[in-house]
Amino acid sequence: MKMSRRTFLMQSGMAAAATMLPASVRASNSTGLRVRLAHDLLRPQYHLMPAANWMNDPNGPIFHKGRYHMFFQYNPNASVWGNMHWAHSSSPDMIHWKHEPVAIAPTPNGWDRDGVFSGCIVLDGAIPAAIYTGVLPPDTPANATLKDGQHTWREVQCLAHSHDAHLRTWQKLADPILARPPAGLAVTGFRDPCVWREGNGWRMAVGSGFAGKGGAVFLYSSPDLRQWTYLNPLVEGRSTGQTGTNPVDTGDMWECPDFFPLGDRHVLLISTMGKVLWKSGHYDGKHLTAEREGVVDHGAYYAERSMLDRDGNRVLWGWIPERRPEAEHRAAGWAGVMSLPRVLSLDSDGQLEMVPAPVIEKLRGAPARVRGAEADAKEKLDAMRIHDLAAELYVECAPDRPFTVDLKSETGAPFAEIAYHPAANGGELRVNNTHATVSTPKDEALHLQAFVDASVLEIFVNRTTTITERIYTAVPEALCISMSSASSLRSFALWPIKPISRDRLTT
Ligand code: FRU
């Protein structure tokens, strides 16, 4: 977990705010914190995030009655982890968001009294049902499933229904639908349910694992979302050989499983050791036999959750965590950003592919373009500017030659260096200090798409490689673009990107 239990307890005594903007921010109106947040040059302008305070995992994204709904882990009282609620935002298009009132809060003395942790939403008949992990103090030491060196908690799986068309109000079932992990198993955790329809019933995958043996995903079945029977592990990992007090850091606990059919196979995503991992293969109703696996994003990206968009595409969301010291984001008054939506597919070999959702193009302004073959390509690139740290870049290059794209302020302050080295480690992409392997077939050009949004830089290369980088350089002036080896350049395009709100509060 992300903060000390002592701080958590101090904060969880505070009343849950009714909206995502805490009273302190609302009251200050045109002065103080609100103004500071609205003018914070590090706050992204077209990524979803709460107006203030801490967010982490996306929860239960769903397209329902003509609107997209996104819920996410949220602390209404501070910009550090703790006191988890489900915040709620809705959107007509997955890109323009409206903050809704907080959807699910801990119930005093309830099964989720210490936190409404991550989960999913499915339609129970026509009624949206949220299945999430409730967290509470263990009544006996044997009931503790979460022990990370800072907290000792019992985790149970809970169910709540929403009977309003806007998914603003939720009624919880009095008791958990799963009160403990499978009998006889000593687990490293028991959380983040992912539920889907299968045949005439339901299946649920829950994140777990075994100390010293690796992570695991438990598979359950149910006829009605209420009575659940444990089947077996959907997938079991192997020990990473790492030791430590927090099983998430050693890879012995898999958080946030997400499981779905894609193409002619199934895909499992899990989060552990600070990364989201994918596995693709064949599912026989009990086990996933994984044939291929990899890393979803090599940068700051965690706790993924997917959904089907209005056209039936599999769209992935993830939490972009902070990469600066806690004291800094506590002082800033905000922490955490939702990734842009990514459309998933599998190639014929079962390789996971990912592209930014085409709807993001709605935000583009007029492009500036240059072709590598043009005699004045360098002059044209030199004249381009990125304003307000909000832009999309597209670079197409020869796959067999290295190149570097440098983004610097007009006064020469470095912002980002994006480098491609085909010879290093079989093909390497580097964004500042973050590295990823890119293997590009010789006959295919290198296609790079980069989204600059204040302190977030999301980069996609050839459908297979992504890096999300955090950059805490508040640049008040425009950014300039330079390319080291313009000879490998085939084409380049730059679009200014329109903010999704009038200020940086994204409301
Ligand atoms: C992942 C996670 C989940 C948990 C939630 C709590 O970031 O640790 O496993 O449900 O965050 O906020």
Image: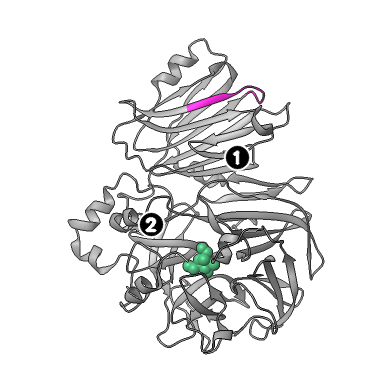
* Residue 154 x %, y %: 53, 81
Question: For residue 413: magenta?
Answer: no
The answer to which image quadrant residue 408 occupies is: top left
First of labels 1, 2 by sequence position: 2
- In the rendered structure, which amino acid carries the disc numbered 1? Ala
Quarter holding the C terminus is: bottom left
Residue 400 visible in the displayed image: yes
Horizontal side of 45 relative to 313 (left or right) equals: left
At x 60% / y 55%, what residue is drawn? 276
Instruction: Determine whether the beta carbon of the residue marked 1 sits less than 8 angstroms from the nearest atom of ligand 1.
Output: no
Question: For residue 399: magenta?
Answer: yes
The answer to which image quadrant residue 186 occupies is: bottom right
Horizontal side of 284 relative to 204 (left or right) equals: right
Horizontal side of 129 relative to 227 (left or right) equals: left
For the residue labelled by badge 2, is the local secondary structure a helix, a strand or a loop? Answer: strand
Q: Which residues are magenta?
A: 398-405
Instruction: Determine whether the beta carbon of the residue marked 2 sits less than 8 angstroms from the nearest atom of ligand 1.
Output: no
Dominant secondary structure (helix, strand or loop) of the stretch shown in magenta? loop
Most distant residue in the top direction: 375
Task: From the image, state whether disc 1 or disc 2 is nearer to you.
Answer: 1
The answer to which image quadrant residue 425 occupies is: top right
Residue highlighted by disc 2:
335
Residue highlighted by disc 1:
436
* Residue 485 x %, y %: 54, 18
* Residue 253 x %, y %: 61, 66
Mark 2 surroundings: few (<14), some (14-19) or many (≥20) residues within 10 A = many
At x 73% / y 26%, what residue is drawn? 443
Total number of numbered discs in the rendering: 2
Mark 1 surroundings: few (<14), some (14-19) or many (≥20) residues within 10 A = some
- Residue 278's place in the image compared with 384, above or below, is below
- In the rendered structure, which amino acid carries the disc numbered 2? Ala
- Separation of residues labelled 1 and 2 (CA atoms): 25 Å
